[in-house]
Amino acid sequence: MEQIELNFQTREENEIGKQGTNRLRGEGFVPAIIYGAGEKSVAIKLDRKELKKIDISRESIVLNLVSEKGKKAVLIKEVQHHPVSDAVLHIDFKHISLHEKIKVNVPVAIKGEAPGVKVDGGVLEHLLWEVEVECLPTDIPEKFEADVSGLNIGDFVYIRDLSSPSGVKIINDPETAIISVAPPRKEEVKEEVVEEVKEEPELIRREKKEEEVVEETKEEKE
């Protein structure tokens, strides 16, 4: 699997804490931390432009964090986003050994077109979006492909149907369903209920009074 390099710098003492991290963000940096593999946690910062090299939402990407002191192989463990702008506020990186097996989640993509959808009008339902695997960091697959080209209405694709590369073990239950083709959804016909408009009591009294005035006027003229 491709390994991407991201440049980082170690944070100074005045760049740690609420005020320090806010100042870093204002200067175009993203505060982060590296931990794991029995090493002491390290507070770092990355230029926000560096993050454009990767899909920040994927935890299965092996990254090499590079500084003047060398490289550190890591995985993304947690990303904090701003609740309104969705900008990245902080990242947790986990230091890993390239020679020890790890467990990560790998996305599942759909391959092909199901006859049950194309011909019979069924609904393709993606039930499981990721599978958990165990392997060396260098063997992590980019994705698994679930082939739906033979699915009719009522058919499924299960974990057992996925093709796993050599050295990669899928941990999920083999009988877990990933994709299904459901019958066409029936449109609900809503009956229109016409409600009788009830006149307001005050309006009824007013109209009755007006009728009485008209009658009185007629009598006076006669």
Image: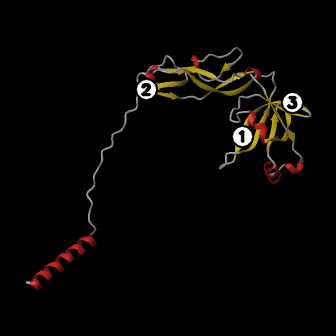
Q: Which mark is residue 71?
A: 3
Image quadrant occupied by the N terminus = top right
Q: Farthest residue to the front: give it.
A: 221
Q: Give the residue drawn at x 86%, y 34%.
A: 39
The residue nearer to you, when weighing 150 against 158, is: 150
In what element is the residue under mark 2?
loop
Q: Give the residue drawn at x 60%, y 25%.
A: 109
Q: Residues within 10 Å of mark 3 (few under 14, many from 20)?
A: some
Where residue 17 appears, x then y in whole percent? 82, 51
Q: Give the residue drawn at x 69%, y 22%.
A: 141
Q: Residues within 10 Å of mark 1 (few under 14, many from 20)?
A: some
The residue indicated by pointer 1 is: 79
Label 2 vs 3, first from the N-terminus: 3
Amino acid type at image mark 1: Val
Q: Quadrant of residue 195?
A: bottom left
The residue indicated by pointer 2 is: 122
Where residue 87 appears, x then y in whole percent? 70, 45
Where residue 202 appears, x then y in whole percent? 28, 72
Where residue 212 appears, x then y in whole percent? 17, 78
Amino acid type at image mark 2: Gly
Mark 2–mark 1 Cα distance, whole angstroms, equals 37 Å
Determine whether, in the image, residue 197 is placed left or right of residue 35: left
